[in-house]
């Protein structure tokens, strides 16, 4: 089965990711960079979305032109860090619906625990983009997609800023059919389950909580 990983190596994305990795990047700058990168990622993630032709009328005549097929895209944010992606993504896909998956990582087991789940209706006609800056151990991503699949969406894509081989293996062992879009696959995980070299805790850096 497919275990797709799409590396987004656009120079602008890579440049901004490098600035985000720097430990002396301020909370304000980090948040702005996440906004900019997420907008750029939205273009890449939606590149192969299915299209359909509809008839419209220009100021001069009628014509057939293409639009995204089906109901609106759903941006599924894994709380809390996934919310850092929302503004940039919505800038590019303003008609998207937004859903939330509330998860936290148990510090002892490193396992994901769900505390909130809310998605739009009629998910069977929607394409879902799951947002989480880090795909580290993969446990949160697996649980989030497990829950999303229960709503029977038409398709699911997963997007993150940074991942690693361990996270990709865990995720694709559970969900080989869900493609991952990321600018970077880093070396691995440290003893605390953080990606190295990574960029630190994305949630803390976005919200200034550490």
Image (tube, helix red, strand yellow):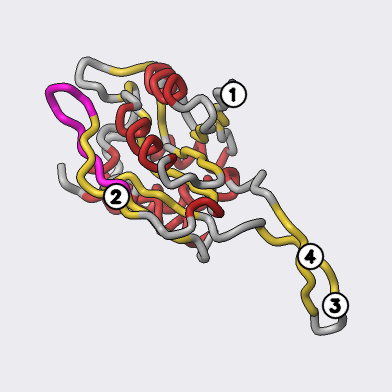
Residue at screen point 36% across, 40% down: 147
Quarter of the image with the N terminus is: top right
Left or right: residue 87 versus residue 200 is right
Q: At 21% from the left edge and 35% from the top edge, which residue is drawn?
A: 113
Residue that label 1 marks: 2
Q: CA distance from mark 2 to mark 1?
A: 27 Å
- Mark 3 / mark 2, whichever is N-terminal: 3
In contact (CB < 8 Å): disc 3 and disc 4: no
Q: CA distance from mark 3 to mark 1?
A: 41 Å
Residue 65 spot, x, y in % from top left: 79, 65
Q: Residues within 10 Å of mark 4 (few under 14, many from 20)?
A: few
Marks 3/2: CA–CA distance: 43 Å
Question: Which mark is nearer the camera, 4 or 2?
Answer: 2
Magenta extent: 101-111
Expressed as whole percent of the image width and height from the top left, the position of residue 7 reads 56, 30
Residue 186 shows in this picture: no
Q: Is residue 8 magenta?
A: no
* Spot occupied by residue 19 in the image (x, y as percentages of width and height): 40, 39
The answer for how far apart the CA atoms under marks 4 and 2 are is: 36 Å
What's the mark number on residue 65?
Answer: 4
Q: Is residue 105 left or right of residue 42?
A: left
Inspect this view and state whether residue 203 appears.
yes
The label number, if any, that marks residue 117 in the structure image? 2
Q: Secondary structure at mark 1?
A: loop
Q: Quadrant of the C terminus?
A: top left
């Amino acid at each position: 089965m497919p275990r797709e990983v799409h590396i987004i190596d656009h120079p602008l994305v890579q440049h901004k990711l490098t600035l985000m990795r720097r430990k002396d990047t301020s909370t304000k700058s980090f948040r702005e960079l996440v906004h900019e990168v997420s907008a750029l990622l939205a273009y890449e993630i939606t590149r192969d979305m299915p299209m359909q032709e509809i008839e419209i009328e220009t100021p001069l005549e009628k014509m057939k032109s293409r639009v995204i097929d089906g109901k609106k895209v759903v941006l599924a944010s894994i709380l809390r860090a996934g919310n850092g992606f929302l503004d940039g993504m919505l800038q590019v896909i303003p008609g998207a619906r937004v859903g939330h998956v509330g998860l936290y990582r148990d510090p002892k087991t490193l396992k994901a625990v769900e505390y909130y789940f809310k998605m739009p209706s009629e998910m069977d006609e929607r394409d879902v983009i799951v947002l989480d800056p880090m795909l580290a151990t993969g446990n949160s991503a697996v649980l989030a997609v497990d829950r999303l699949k229960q709503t029977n969406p038409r398709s699911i894509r997963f997007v993150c800023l940074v991942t690693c081989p361990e996270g990709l293996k865990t995720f694709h062992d559970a969900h080989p059919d869900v493609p991952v879009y990321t600018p970077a696959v880093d070396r691995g995980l440290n003893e605390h389950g953080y990606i190295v070299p990574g960029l630190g805790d994305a949630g803390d850096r976005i919200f200034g909580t550490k």
